[in-house]
Amino acid sequence: MTAFLTELLRDLTRHRARTSLSAVCLLLVIGSVVAIESASAVAREVFVADEEQRNGRAVTAVLALPGAGANADTLRRLDAALERRVRADGGSATIEVEMSARAGRADVPVGFGVLGNVRLIAIAGDPTTIRRLPVLFGRMPRTALPPAVLLNAAARERWHTDRLTLQATPGSPTFTARVEGVVSDGSPDPVLWVPWSTVAAFDPAAFRASSTMTVLAHVPGASYASIVDEMRAAVQEVGLVAPVASFSRSDDVPTIERRLRTTRSGFLLASVVALVIAVVALFNINVASVRERQRELVVRRAFGASRARIALLVLCSSLLVAVLASGAANGVAALCVHLLGPAILPRASPVLAPHFPLGAAVTSTAVGLVASLLSAAYPAVLASRVQIAGALRD
Amino acid sequence: MSVISLTDCSHAVSLPDGSSLGLLANVSVALEKGQSVSVRGRSGSGKTTLLSILGLLLTPDAGQVHVAGASLDGATDAQRTRARRATIGFVFQSASLVPNLTAYENVELPLLQGGDHSRARRRQAVAAAMDRAQITHRRTSFPRQLSGGEQQRVALARALVRSPAVIIADEPTASLDVATADRVLALLLERCREDGTSIVIATHDPQVAQHAHRRLTLDDGQLHDE
């Protein structure tokens, strides 16, 4: 065994041109497969992230309750029911009531008429747990008082302040809210999220029978049907009626996955092409190497090397290069992902920095080993069949 | 008991025009332990073919080959390889060293082709063989850095490293100057005397042949004692 390993290492280190060419070739194909797989994963992530930022994480169920008597008491009881049925199991749920509010900088007196129309969402729960909203700083306010607000990036850009004057509904009293956090929701228009209890404290009439309550729920790993079951039970608990037909899926990730299937097939095809090119290139390198080493192989056979040993030497030598090249390629890939990923993504992007593609690394290593085996199989047979009858003739 | 013997061996080669040329016709020869045998003959007389059969590199068309009394009739390639590994060392006309390996590594090569040799045993055997071939001082040199005579001494050390029962040498001095040729020949015959190694040397040179215990001539496919 040690003798064979000695021969194997000598074979690699003393035929540097062949080893280097094979290693570069494998490095390229393995690197290509990792890059192709990573690109495929990043492409999917970009589309899914956009969808989850706008409409909710996969899988999010939504229930619109128009004219459901969205008074503060109903909202409080429904929030408590969702806490028990959804959030307690590791899920997330929000109840949103959208209002046509007005807002302005708190350091400008209201009398100067600088309050502008804005979309205000009175919310029970944390919107960042339902939608993929990168938090630029702070967090969703958790208590009714003192008043606090969560802004989107457009609102932050518009007012550039840490205190806002708000008027939840026309004619209602104004109140000043501290900016507790800023998130990126991808919207060009300003959006404010205020705890429903804060709105209720300053404007008890803000929740009217005409308001529409939108209930959203997301449980990681749960099916759409099971989420709907829990939501319906919560709604029934507070005496509201919600037929199955009134539920729908908020996110459209499955459609995106379907559309991306063609793209992924393209990426897969590119991987196969890279593999074929590598096999052909490695095959040529190995055949040329065996032909160049005919005399050496004859001498080895004359001194007692069996056909199997010669074949094994060629095969193992090729495999060892593949293993080393895989390690190098995956190391470079890991370094690129670790250093480049976070550097190129903007802070406000919902796209997650790519992780080291472990699956791609395993696939590419397997591809490298298969490529090296396929390309070395015939040269190994060729090497084992050198004619030793003419060994004494140069 | 003979170390290697051929009994009524015949061998022919096919020519490009489809005809065949008989090189050996019912040749019988037995090689005894510690015996040196020279084989002379004109070019194309079949000397290399005879040595190839003796070296178990070539199977004769007809006849029997015995190694240490055991017949190799019907032996598989693996069995012939094992017998060759255990019994025979080669010195080729040109040294035929592996260009990418140092002198030390070239000498070590036969020990790596099978058998149970630890690194320490290999190191010891290589050192002894290089010492006997008086080439230890060039152990780290590559073949391209060696003279013709030095290369042939490395080749001789390689043939000796397994302490084979038989050394087959095909015109080992043909490409060397007289002084170097004498030195290589002296080293070969020394092994024959001191270790009881049997040696078969194919040569054109009567001066080389005269040192052998037994001198044979190959003519028209027949072996004759001189």
Image (tube, coloured by chain):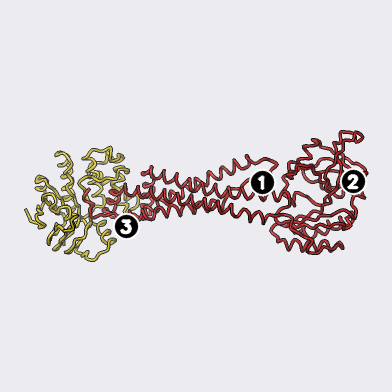
Chain colours: A red, B yellow
Under mark 3, the amino acid is Arg
Q: Residue furthest bottom?
A: B74
* 3 and 1 marks in contact (CB < 8 Å): no
Q: Chain of mark 3?
A: A
Q: Which residue is mark 2?
A: A169
Q: Which residue is mark 3?
A: A307
Question: Callout 2: helix, strand or loop?
Answer: loop
Q: Chain of mark 2?
A: A
Q: Nearer the viewer, mark 3 or mark 1?
A: 1
Earlier in the chain: of badge 3 and badge 1, it is 3
Residue A210: x %, y % from top left: 89, 54
Frontmost residue, B133 versus A379: A379
Residue A12: x %, y % from top left: 39, 46
Q: Is residue B38 left or right of residue A251?
A: left
Q: How many marks?
A: 3
Under mark 2, the amino acid is Thr
Can you tell which quarter of the image residue B9 is in?
Answer: bottom left
Q: Which residue is mark 1?
A: A351
Asked whether residue A90 is in view, the answer is no
Frontmost residue, B42 versus B143: B42
